[in-house]
Image (spheres, helix red, strand yellow):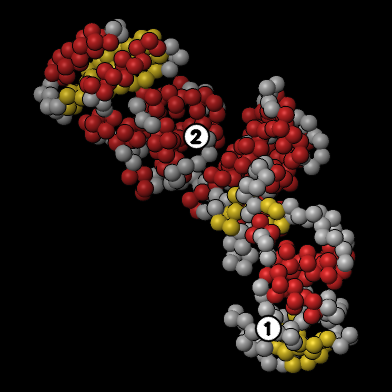
Amino acid sequence: ILRNADKVRRIYKEVSGSERADTWFPFQTVCEKCGRIGTTEVTAYDGKEVTYTCRPDLVKWARGCGYAGKVSPFDGRGKLPWKLEWPAKWTTFPVTIEGAGKDHSTKGGSRDVSEHCLREIFGTKPPMNIPYEFFLVGGAKMSSSRGVGASARDMANFLPPEVLRFLMTKPQPKHPVNFSPDEIYITKLFNEFDRYHWRTYHDAKAQEPDKRLYLLSEIAPEGNFHDANFQLVVTLVQMPHLNLVAEIEKRKGSKLTELELKHLNRRIQSAKYWLENYATEEEKTKLQDSLPARAQQLSQTQRAFLDMLADALPGTAWEDEPLQHKIFEIERLVPIEYPVGFQAIYRVLLDRDSGPKAGNLLAFLDSGFVLKRLKELTSDKPVFWRESSLTEDAFEQWLTKEKTHVKSATARADFANGVGVAEFTVTMDDEKTHAKRVITEPCESAACAVAYGNRLTEQLAGLTGVAIQFNG
């Protein structure tokens, strides 16, 4: 390449429009005096040594020392520009196929320059090019020069090999790979991988390309085995009082096999790496010894939900799924939107707005501690009613829309501090029970609330045709 520097200069100009001085040689050597390489400029080659200067003004990000000298370009004393390193490697190894980012594959781009140099200097055919999309990190193009992204070594240290292969293989051709180390993205990545694994061996309707994707992600064929949920593993490694393997076996329902233990250990390593290198303080699961100050920001509806949940939990089996089902049941009976209810649980226990599956979290904790914490916040009943109520028209519309699915409905009246309320409990044909609430203000007494509730019940029953039992 050094012997053909004139050809390189001509190709640079003809292919990419980049002009180089007649004294420019495509090589940078390590300065013998200051040890820098980015500041050196080679201006001659005599067949054995290159002549160079360490220029103070060559680049903006470093200042050369001004030393000038001659040195052999071999034995690791310098490097080629990567547009020339490419054809050098293609020739040396030799390479038959090598892709590159789409930005390098444009007309006049670095790939074009490298291929012309390969043909003219070495007289060989360039390897097949497969242009590919960008690797994005949090939606931004990965760039080592701008410090955006993660190194390949970091990625390999973090993700189990089969999950990393899945991440790289799943996107369709000519679509970017978008990676982000935040909790939501990482949890989704592992869950999606586990879903493909399960479907490959359990779903008769699984599409062949989906099965193929999973099998391509494997390091070696291993068949079916139990995957430990990654978010669960992340939570468990932060709770040293628990036996992690025993907790996973409890959820599997049997002892883990040697293969399952191997994959669990990989996920434990990934969880610890994520917590140490990527997780924000908000994303870490730390059980709060006392009620967090931010819990005071919860709405009256969220406070009422926690209170009702505490009342319902003593009769619930202290296990993942029963607890999760009970949470959903109470959310429908408040009523409160599911994410808002879960936020209340995470806020009082972890001082976070999100977290691991709530049923799992409660199951890890002492029931007495949980019930006490859920009861620590008091709610203002009239304010809670106002936050969670519907207008008469809105409730009528809902009841009319759902009337064919209503299995049974009851109503009752309540009163507090000048506010009367009619509360309706509606059980649907899917056996799920919902609570709806309509308030009337002002209301001077409980008798006023009862009269209002009775009138509204009769009115709605007549309008919708739904039989509603009023219990006073």
Comes first in the chain, label 2 or label 1: 1
Up the image or down, 163 lies above or below 313; here it is: below
User: Residue at the location (74% across, 93% down)?
Assistant: 68
Which residue has dot 1 on it? 39
What amino acid is at disc 2? Ala
What separation in Å lies between label 2 and label 1 (alpha carbons)? 57 Å
> Which amino acid, by three-letter code, is at mark 1?
Thr
Q: Quadrant of the N terminus?
A: bottom right
In the figure, is residue 190 to the left or right of 23?
left
Q: Secondary structure at mark 1?
A: loop
Q: Residue at x 39, y 17 (%)?
A: 433
Residue 48: where, in percent of width, then height?
89, 86
- Residue 163 x %, y %: 69, 43
* Residue at numbered disc 2: 358
Asked if residue 75 shows in the view, the reply is yes
224 to 74, vertically: above or below:
above
